[in-house]
Image: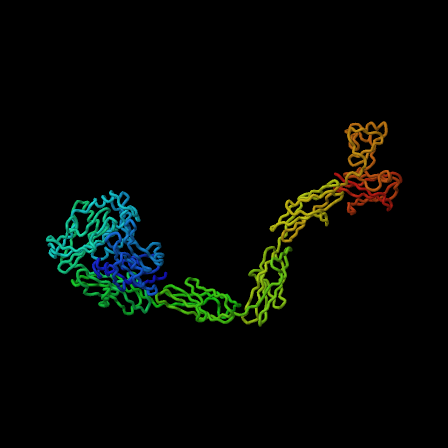
């Protein structure tokens, strides 16, 4: 863990002369200021969360005169110290209140320190010790308004007393109570500072509040009693009263022009402050007086001091007693006071010599000796005192390594001694700062204009690094204050450069280290570009084959090779022009292709081309959902084709085909097509999908779609119950029938269940089968040699032959004239009937060819319907 650094602030105190007179002279003011700064140092350095130690030290006191009725003195009466001088200021400025003859005190520490000032609102309310901080300290303390508060207790909710639970923000003495160290700090002497029921309230007391606190008036007598060295009345002692107004109200005033009132003790050694002609103040009590009395009594050339806090007077009244404050000039000696700064540990590095201030004073005498001790061992008598500030300055000899605990022992003219709180100086081994450039490596080449990221490491043996500077030769390029240390040097012209870094540690006087120089070379870069494929090219074959072509050249040199990349992945390299590479087996996706050219120098300079984006497309998916293969229809048929088509990028269109013939195109979902007026035959249909990248996919074919022919007969359809006569021709169940002559013709009009041609139980009694409506070739009348029945058939077809003695060949073909089966028969002279087994044939239309001795007798169209 890094050690804290001590930040020293040299303070110049500016004190208006009226303030000096009002508060007992220069020595009292200087003692107060030193005590205040010691308190600030103690508080800050006790905070574990702060990053630093703080040492506020008063190095000089400047006195000025200003009788204006405002506090602009803090802004305009002198030239403010520049921040670079590391000096800060305290300002005490007394000025009359515009609404009364009272005085206010502005106490400020400017720049980075604490600011105290009195702020009075229009209603007369305010806070004597308001505080403001600069960003540095405020951020460390995590408090946006300031470092420390001095607030009195708050009146409680019942408005009849002080609520101790609201109490003090910090137990630090106020400016007034710290003037003289022998006074015991009594925080309730300030409890009227905030006089309302809320912390920042500004309302005036009600009568009930006033009565609860003051009883509506002061005690009849408030006196100061001065005793001589034997305890008797100190007659004729001079007593000065200093009214310290906390909140001068509009209806409260001090009549005297000067705030300093001088009285002489009477024969009893008393000065009666209230309820007598000697009352030095003319007071009205529209609201409680917000002031204390600071009292200085001088007797036989000796002066002693005391306080008359307001609450003591008010409590005396409430208790029904008179209030007397006693000042005794007994022979009891008051011990001297001493403090040494800074209060927090001071850390330094060998060799170390330092200087620190010592504040020593005696209220009832003089300081006779100031002795300094290091780790309990006497070092020397300190005699170096500034005549103006009364501060002793101790200059150490070079200190050995380790911790040194310094204390100061002071003695007064009566022999009383006092030992200061310790001050620790920790002397550590001298810091060693190291720095090195980690990137780029020595002699690294860059292409102009170069973009050089410089990274560095810095190390300090016992502390921290405050910054790292980056240099080109002696020219500062940039600075980084946090790890990792880096600087990006851009737009670097061609040339050779020497780079270094310089590291600083965090000490007040920093140690530094400069790295070993690193040389970088910036050269003219090759020019390279991809000529093909063009950007956004699409490949619709998976896996794809992509041929990459590039051109490359360099001024004043040659190209040693060109590398081809997919993103950061090297695909291949080509050492000779023309530079080309065929990338094969590329799966679907989007790819960024670049070419990187190298010049032919020993340490080559490279250039990467602009990226070319290519896309290998995933083809769409498509299928026909209806009809299914082997579906049958009747001519002229309407075949409704439905399909599904999907694609990650979107479907552009779907085409429908009969074999290789385009039937139609659909561009929006649902992708369906109605094929109308389809003639008899067997068909195979497909769907072809196109996506919006140009990719295509053809569906699996739906085959063997059978379209049966319509009726081939011209005869009318048989109608049950119609009147038929001898010779009437009708068609029914795919065949043609003729009504038989009388006496059978009457049955042709009979009940259909019995006489419907081809289906009735006794149809042959009324009708004669003429032939099939689906025959092709010669009809029965024209070709009496061959008769084929039944048609449609199931598993057996009968063929009746007349006068066909010899070899008969029966061949069955599909509508594409492909032979499906052939059977040979030998017939006798006369009429012969042969049978053909068609169990192996599926439903459909076929061509049946009959040949006799090599001559085709007939070709008929038959239907198989199972």
Percent across and percent down for residue 88 are 31, 62
**Position of 321 relative to 528 (above/below):** above
Percent across and percent down for residue 291 are 23, 51
Quarter occupied by residue 797 = top right
Coloration mode: rainbow
Quarter occupied by residue 39 = bottom left
Residue 139 shown left or right of residue 770 in the figure: left
Percent across and percent down for residue 772 are 81, 37
**Position of 762 relative to 685 (above/below):** above
Residue 523 shown left or right of residue 176 in the figure: right
Tell me the quarter of the image containing the C terminus: top right
Percent across and percent down for residue 685 are 71, 46
Count of residue discs: 0
Tell me the quarter of the image containing the N terminus: bottom left
Q: In terms of depth relative to the viewer, which is nearer, 601 or 526?
A: 526
Q: In terms of depth relative to the viewer, which is nearer, 295 or 38?
A: 295
Q: In terms of depth relative to the viewer, which is nearer, 363 or 348?
A: 363
**Position of 348 relative to 721 (above/below):** below
Residue 330 visible in the shown view:
yes
Residue 322 shown left or right of residue 659 in the figure: left
Residue 346 visible in the shown view:
no
Quarter occupied by residue 299 = bottom left
């Amino acid at each position: 863990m890094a050690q804290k650094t001590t930040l020293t602030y040299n303070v110049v105190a500016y004190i208006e002369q009226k303030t000096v007179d009002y508060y007992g002279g220069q020595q009292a003011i200087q003692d107060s200021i030193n005590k205040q700064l010691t308190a600030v140092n103690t508080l800050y350095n006790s905070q574990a969360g702060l990053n630093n130690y703080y040492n506020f030290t008063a190095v000089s006191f400047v006195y000025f005169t200003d009788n204006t009725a405002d506090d602009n003195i803090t802004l305009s009466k002198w030239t403010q110290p520049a921040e670079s001088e590391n000096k800060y200021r305290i300002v005490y400025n007394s000025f009359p209140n515009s609404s009364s003859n009272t005085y206010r005190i502005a106490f400020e520490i400017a720049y980075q320190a604490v600011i105290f000032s009195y702020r009075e609102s229009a209603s007369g309310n305010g806070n004597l010790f308001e505080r403001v901080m600069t960003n540095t300290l405020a951020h460390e303390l995590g408090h946006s308004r300031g470092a420390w508060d001095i607030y009195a207790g708050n009146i409680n909710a019942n408005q009849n007393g002080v609520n101790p639970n609201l109490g003090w923000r910090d137990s630090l003495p106020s400016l007034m109570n710290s003037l003289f160290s022998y006074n015991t700090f009594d925080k309730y002497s300030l409890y009227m500072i905030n006089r309302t029921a809320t912390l920042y309230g500004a309302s005036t007391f009600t009568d009930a509040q006033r009565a609860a606190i003051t009883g509506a008036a002061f005690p009849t007598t408030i006196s100061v009693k001065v005793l001589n060295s034997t305890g008797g009345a100190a007659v004729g002692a001079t007593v000065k009263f200093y009214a310290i107004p906390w909140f001068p109200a509009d209806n409260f005033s001090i009549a005297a022009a000067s705030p300093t009132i001088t009285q002489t003790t009477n024969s009893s050694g008393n000065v009666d402050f209230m309820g007598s002609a000697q009352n030095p103040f003319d007071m009205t009590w529209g609201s409680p007086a917000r002031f204390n009395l600071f009292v200085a009594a001088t007797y036989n050339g000796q002066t002693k001091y005391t306080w008359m806090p307001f609450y003591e007077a008010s409590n005396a009244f409430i208790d029904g007693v008179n209030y007397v404050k006693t000042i005794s000039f007994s022979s009891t000696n008051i011990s001297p006071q001493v403090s040494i700064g800074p209060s927090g540990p001071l850390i330094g590095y060998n060799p170390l010599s330092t200087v620190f201030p010592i504040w020593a004073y005696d209220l009832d005498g003089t300081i006779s000796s100031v002795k300094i001790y290091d780790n309990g061992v006497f070092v020397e008598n300190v005699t170096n005192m500034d005549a103006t500030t009364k501060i002793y300055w101790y200059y150490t000899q070079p200190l050995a390594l380790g911790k040194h605990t310094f204390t100061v022992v002071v003695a007064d003219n009566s022999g009383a001694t006092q030992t200061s709180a310790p001050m620790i100086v920790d002397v550590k081994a001298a810091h060693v700062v190291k720095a090195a450039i980690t990137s780029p490596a020595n002699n690294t080449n860059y292409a102009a204009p170069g973009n050089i990221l410089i990274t560095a490491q810095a190390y300090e043996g016992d502390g921290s690094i405050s910054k790292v500077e980056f240099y080109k030769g002696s020219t500062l390029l940039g600075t980084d204050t946090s790890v990792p240390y880096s600087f990006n040097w851009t737009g670097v012209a061609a040339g050779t450069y020497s780079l270094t870094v310089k590291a600083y540690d965090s000490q007040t006087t920093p140690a530094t280290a400069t790295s070993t120089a690193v040389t970088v070379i910036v050269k003219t870069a090759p020019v390279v570009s991809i000529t093909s494929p063009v950007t956004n090219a699409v490949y619709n074959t998976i896996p794809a084959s992509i041929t990459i072509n590039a051109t490359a050249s360099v001024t004043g040199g040659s190209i040693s090779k060109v590398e081809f990349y997919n993103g950061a992945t090297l695909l291949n390299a080509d050492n000779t022009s023309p530079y080309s590479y065929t990338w094969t087996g590329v799966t679907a996706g989007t790819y960024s292709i670049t070419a990187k050219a190298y010049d032919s120098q020993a340490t080559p300079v490279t250039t990467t081309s602009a990226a070319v984006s290519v896309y290998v497309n995933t083809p769409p998916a498509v299928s026909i959902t209806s009809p299914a293969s082997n579906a049958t229809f009747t001519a002229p048929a309407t075949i409704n084709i439905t399909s599904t088509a999907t694609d990650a990028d979107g479907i552009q269109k779907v085409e429908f085909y009969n074999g290789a013939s385009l039937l139609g195109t659909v561009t929006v979902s649902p992708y369906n097509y109605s094929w109308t007026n389809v003639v008899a035959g067997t068909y195979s249909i497909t769907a072809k999908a196109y996506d919006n990248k140009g990719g295509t996919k053809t569906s699996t074919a739906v085959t063997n779609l059978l379209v049966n022919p319509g009726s081939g007969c011209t005869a009318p359809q048989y109608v049950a119950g119609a009147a038929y006569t001898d010779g009437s021709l009708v068609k029914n169940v795919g065949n043609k029938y003729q009504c038989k002559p009388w006496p059978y013709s009457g049955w042709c009009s009979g009940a259909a269940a019995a006489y419907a041609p081809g289906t009735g139980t006794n149809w042959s009694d009324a009708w004669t089968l003429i032939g099939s409506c689906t025959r092709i070739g010669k009809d029965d009348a024209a070709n009496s040699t061959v008769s084929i029945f039944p048609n449609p058939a199931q598993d057996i077809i009968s063929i009746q032959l007349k006068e066909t003695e010899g070899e008969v060949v029966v061949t069955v073909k599909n509508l594409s004239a492909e032979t499906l089966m052939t059977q040979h028969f030998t017939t006798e002279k006369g009429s012969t009937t042969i049978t053909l087994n068609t169990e192996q044939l599926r439903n459909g239309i076929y061509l049946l060819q009959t040949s006799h001795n090599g001559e085709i007798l007939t070709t008929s169209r038959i239907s198989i319907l199972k």
